[in-house]
């Protein structure tokens, strides 16, 4: 399995059943490895080991200069929790949350501290920002809304399960996705609950999910069963559903098809990618599929004017034609390096990996043009680009900002 570890998804299942399912998975894994050791000789063992380890990095010819603008600390990072915390950027500020350390705001260009909100809450979801608020959720289902300008607390609320996705904020509502498949809408001014929507979860899913995405009068939610749902922003009614990938296979492990990365809305077209190596473009208002590609992964897609860039569970980076879904190129050199989703910075796609490296690739052909290390800890959360600056948060809580040379 990848570093995006599987979880038993139903929060309503008895704890004993959860432990039994987890133990069963471990037993099957150990038994399988034990059996395989009896099949292979020494050379085969070495080959099998090589095929399971991250691909070693090879030298590249650097053709683009990337400079680190600044670095800062968000507090105690997520470590091995697998919540994929990432920054939010708005109006020239970077907002970050930490498991221990509260919420902090930095200047996008200089990294100077703007404000700091200290809290004992274990803030696990990356912050969402919009309508003058910064909102974050916790491992215990707490939701805290702060004034984006000052960091002052505006209101708090509670949801039914841990929150490991950034809230979506806009059009007068705050949308919080909890890890039991529920989306809850709160009034942006008062924090009063307006409505909630629930999606039943498969018994086994990829650990983690991402934020809903807002459209005019819509909210789009990627689900753990491989579907996208469009909800009415006013009352949470389901307007349409579309399967990005069908869960099939003999085991629950094989059936995992999560749409865990936030779908990307471009004008009226919605782009979504699934853990089952599938990416789809849909008409936002109707849910009608425009094209389907058999390449994709659980992370959010990166979008340029001509390309949709996705990373799959094997560590291959794919660039798809934005209007047809046809594969323009693939970059397989980062195999098994547990890649983040791709972000687009200028004419390049950039991804992070398990060793803290950032890799820039040309959008035209996928060739590497630069590599930098953001730290020695893994990067798991989404990379964010704003005003030409790439902002990255690793699992230790270190935040770095990067700019391409002009």
Image (cartoon, helix red, strand yellow):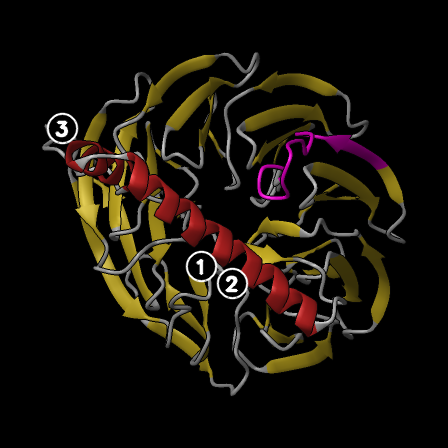
Residue lying at the far front of the rendered structure: 38
Cα gap from disc 3 to disc 2, whole angstroms: 33 Å
SS label for mark 2:
loop
Q: Earlier in the sequence, mark 3 or mark 1?
A: 3
Q: Position of residue 366 (x, y in %)?
A: 30, 22
Q: Earlier in the sequence, mark 3 or mark 2?
A: 3
- Does the stretch in magenta take in 19? no
Which mark is drawn over residue 126? 2
Residue at x-position 21% and y-position 59%: 376
**Above or below for 147 versus 167:** below
Q: Is residue 107 left or right of residue 28?
A: left
* Nearer to me, 223 or 38: 38
Cα gap from disc 1 to disc 2, whole angstroms: 6 Å
**Above or below for 34 versus 245:** below
Quadrant position of residue 365:
top left
Q: How many marks?
A: 3
Quadrant position of residue 100:
bottom left
Quadrant position of residue 328:
top left
Q: Position of residue 404 (x, y in %)?
A: 23, 40
Check if mark 1's residue and mark 2's residue have beta carbons within 8 Å: yes
Q: Position of residue 240 (x, y in %)?
A: 84, 34
Location of mark 3 (residue):
63
SS label for mark 1:
loop
Residue at x-position 25% and y-position 64%: 71
Label 1: how many Cα within 10 Å (few below 14, some 14–19, many 20+): many
Location of mark 1 (residue):
87
Q: Position of residue 171 (x, y in %)?
A: 75, 53
Residue range corresponding to the magenta coloring:
240-255
């Amino acid at each position: 399995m990848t570093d995006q570890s599987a979880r038993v998804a139903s929060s309503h299942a008895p704890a004993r059943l959860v432990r039994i399912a987890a133990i069963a998975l471990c037993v099957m894994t150990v038994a399988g490895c034990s059996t395989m050791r009896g099949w292979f000789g020494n050379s085969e063992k070495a080959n099998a080991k090589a095929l399971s380890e991250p691909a070693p990095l090879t030298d590249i010819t650097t053709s683009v200069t990337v400079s680190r603008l600044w670095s800062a600390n968000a507090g105690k990072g997520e470590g091995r929790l697998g919540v994929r915390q990432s920054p939010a950027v708005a109006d020239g500020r970077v907002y970050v949350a930490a498991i221990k350390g509260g919420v902090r705001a930095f200047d996008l260009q200089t990294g100077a501290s703007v404000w700091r909100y200290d809290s004992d809450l274990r803030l696990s979801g990356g912050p969402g920002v919009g309508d003058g608020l910064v909102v974050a959720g916790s491992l215990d289902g707490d939701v805290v809304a702060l004034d984006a300008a000052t960091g002052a607390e505006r209101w708090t609320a509670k949801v039914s399960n841990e929150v490991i996705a950034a809230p979506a904020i806009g059009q007068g509502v705050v949308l919080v996705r909890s890890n039991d498949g529920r989306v809850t809408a709160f009034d942006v001014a008062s924090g009063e609950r307006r409505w909630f929507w629930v999606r039943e979860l498969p018994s086994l899913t990829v650990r983690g999910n991402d934020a809903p995405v807002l459209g005019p009068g819509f909210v789009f939610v990627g689900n753990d069963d491989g579907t996208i749902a469009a909800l009415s922003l006013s009352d949470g009614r389901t307007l349409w559903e579309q399967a990005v990938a069908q869960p099939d296979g003999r085991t629950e492990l094989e059936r995992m098809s999560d749409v865990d990365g936030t779908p990307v809305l471009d004008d009226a077209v919605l782009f979504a990618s699934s853990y089952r190596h599938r990416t789809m473009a849909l008409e936002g208002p109707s849910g009608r599929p425009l094209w389907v590609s058999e390449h994709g992964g659980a992370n959010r897609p990166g979008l340029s004017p001509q390309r949709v860039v996705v990373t799959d569970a094997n560590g291959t980076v794919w660039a798809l034609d934005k209007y047809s879904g046809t594969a323009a190129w693939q970059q397989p050199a980062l195999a098994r390096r547990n890649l983040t989703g791709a972000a687009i910075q200028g004419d390049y796609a950039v991804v992070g990996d398990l060793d803290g490296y950032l890799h820039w690739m040309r959008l035209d052909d996928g060739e590497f043009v630069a590599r930098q290390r953001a730290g020695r800890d893994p990067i798991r959360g989404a990379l964010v680009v704003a005003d030409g600056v790439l902002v990255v948060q690793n699992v230790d809580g270190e935040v770095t900002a990067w700019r391409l040379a002009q």
